[in-house]
Amino acid sequence: MGRFHPHPPGSHEHGQHPHGPVVPAEVQVDHSGYGTAMERVEVLERILGENERAARANRAAFDAAGVVVVNLMSAPGAGKTTLLVEALRRLCARRRVGIIEGDIETSLDADRLDGFGAAVALVNTGDGFGGECHLDAPMVASALPRLPLAELDLVIIENVGNLVCPAEFVVGEDLRVMMFSVTEGEEKPLKYPVMFRSADLLLINKIDLLPHLDFDLSAFRRNLEAVNPGVSVLAMSARTGAGVDAWCDWLERPPRPLLP
């Protein structure tokens, strides 16, 4: 089971780089000192190709175990870990859950998720992965031996907090969820369209702060619709628990049949 996109929406598929068409190498000028434009394009294609192969292997492992995998992404501080704490309190009573926790350094977030009944595997990208600002498929693969996949129903990947790179790397997931905090500003979908476009579900977090902020929720919804028309949206406050039940319901009943 599982829906796997070899290329995330809005990415390099069909010759398109996630930030737009790749300019032909012959008209690019190298000011970086890190090789010619053609060399940089070749390196990018090699990295993405290797990542896609690893993602397919991850997908095969998830399918063999029969688990649904959700890639949870956001900017730093949007509230992913707080949401997961609240979700685990609800889900672990009725679902067997695994967490792949991605951080550049420290086990702080993984430690917060311990003790709720979920299997937690930490990936520090600073340990042998160059301190990357995202999880890619090989990093996720490194966590799989530390998860009892055959005993799980659901795996949630808490990606490294970043609004750019996580959206560009498929890791073998079924679904992508992006969390946005109202403290970030309503223009963010226009400034980071690849991230917002890649989401199957958009969580608007920290709605309890709306009375205290100069945030135009209607403008945000218009900007989101401009880059990802029709995307499902849930408003919530991970801190108060408002809306968390709705997200747990979404996790237990995926929005469309998962393809074989």
Image: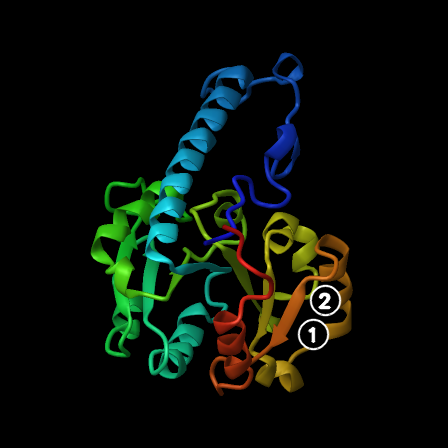
How far apart are the two marked residues, 1 and 2, measured between alpha carbons? 8 Å
Element at label 2? helix
Tell me which numbered mark, 1 or 2, is placed earlier along the sequence: 1
| Left or right, residue 29 beside residue 4 | right
> How far across and down, in percent of the image, does residue 110 sit?
28, 66
Q: Which dot marks residue 220?
A: 2
Of all residues, the one furthest to the front in this rendering is 260
| Left or right, residue 80 beside residue 110 | right
> How far across and down, in percent of the image, does residue 84 sit?
40, 73
In this rendering, the answer to whether 191 lies above or below 111 is: above
Q: What amino acid is found at the position of numbered circle 2 in the picture?
A: Phe
User: Circle 1: is it few (<14), some (14-19), or many (20+) Cα within 10 Å?
Assistant: some
Q: Write the residue at 49% across / 50% down.
A: 260
> How far across and down, in percent of the image, does residue 117 sit?
26, 76
Q: Write the residue at 77% across / 68% down.
A: 219
State if disc 2 and disc 1 touch (CB < 8 Å).
yes
Instruction: Determine which residue is flagged by label 1.
Output: 215
In this rendering, the answer to whether 199 lies above or below 109 is: above
Element at label 1? loop
> How far across and down, in percent of the image, does residue 35 sit?
46, 17
Q: What amino acid is found at the position of numbered circle 1 in the picture?
A: Phe
Quarter of the image containing the N terminus? Answer: bottom left
